[in-house]
Amino acid sequence: MISRLHGEVVEIDGDNIVVDVNGVGYEVACTTALLSRLSLATRVTFSVYTDVREDAIRLFGFDTVAERHIFLLLNRVSGMGPRSSLDVVSNVAIRDLLRAIGSGDVRALMSIKGVGKKKAERIVVELRDLVANMAGERADSLRSMVSIDRTAAGASPPISSDAVSALEVLGFARRDAESAVAQALQGQGPAGDVGELIREALRYV
């Protein structure tokens, strides 16, 4: 499975590029953000997703890790294939997309090119909890990697800290994450579930 490419851009055709990696040309369908920083004969490094089908193998390229994460989430929604997921990521800012999913804003999702009412509703139903849970899990994983021992510290940090970390994992700046969590806490009072706090905070980022 190819997950990253580093090479020279030798062809650009619409949203497709060809990257020469040690003499092998890889054709990649890219997000708008990635395309905006590419030009012929430049060397680039970017993450990709490999879509393997019975009749084809396709590569999709992303400007940031956050773009790739959201693409993979969208690709899990029934009726959303890789091409549709790439179009959504290319046509709306990640922040706006996460805010719409987290707050269940179907109308906002319907404003995205290629997303009708039924598809928007499926995105909310299938991803709202998943976005919050995945962010929380990744935040926990990152804390484990740097060996932060909650027990040794004497007490568990408040779930507001977990929510802030989770929003950072989704790609939001720490200052914005802290502000969103603070507003979410004001709206729902003392929080007991980090997943719910993350979902509420996504309304304010």
Image (cartoon, rainbow, N blue to C red):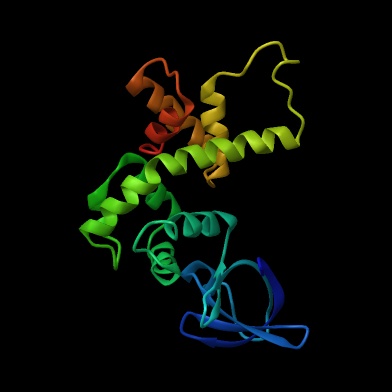
Q: Quadrant of the N terminus?
A: bottom right
* Residue pictured at 29% horizontal, 67% vertical: 113
Quarter of the image where one finds residue 77: bottom left
* Residue pictured at 45% horizontal, 33% vertical: 198
Q: Position of residue 81 (x, y in %)?
A: 41, 67
* Residue pictured at 73% horizontal, 27% vertical: 148
Of the pair 70 and 58, the residue shown nearer to us: 58
Image vertical order of residue 15 relative to residue 148, above or below = below
Q: Position of residue 39 (x, y in %)?
A: 60, 81
Of the pair 164 and 152, the residue shown nearer to us: 152
Q: Position of residue 142 (x, y in %)?
A: 67, 38
**With 18 as the anchor, is 82 left or right in this view?**
left
Q: Position of residue 186 (x, y in %)?
A: 36, 20
* Residue pictured at 48% horizontal, 27% vertical: 194
Quarter of the image where one finds residue 63: bottom right
Image vertical order of residue 76 relative to residue 164, above or below = below
**With 29 as the anchor, is 149 left or right in this view?**
right
Image vertical order of residue 38 relative to residue 106, above or below = below
Q: Quadrant of the C terminus?
A: top left
Quarter of the image where one finds residue 181: top left
Residue reaching furthest to the front: 54
Total number of numbered discs in the rendering: 0
Of the pair 104 and 133, the residue shown nearer to us: 133
Residue reaching furthest to the top: 154
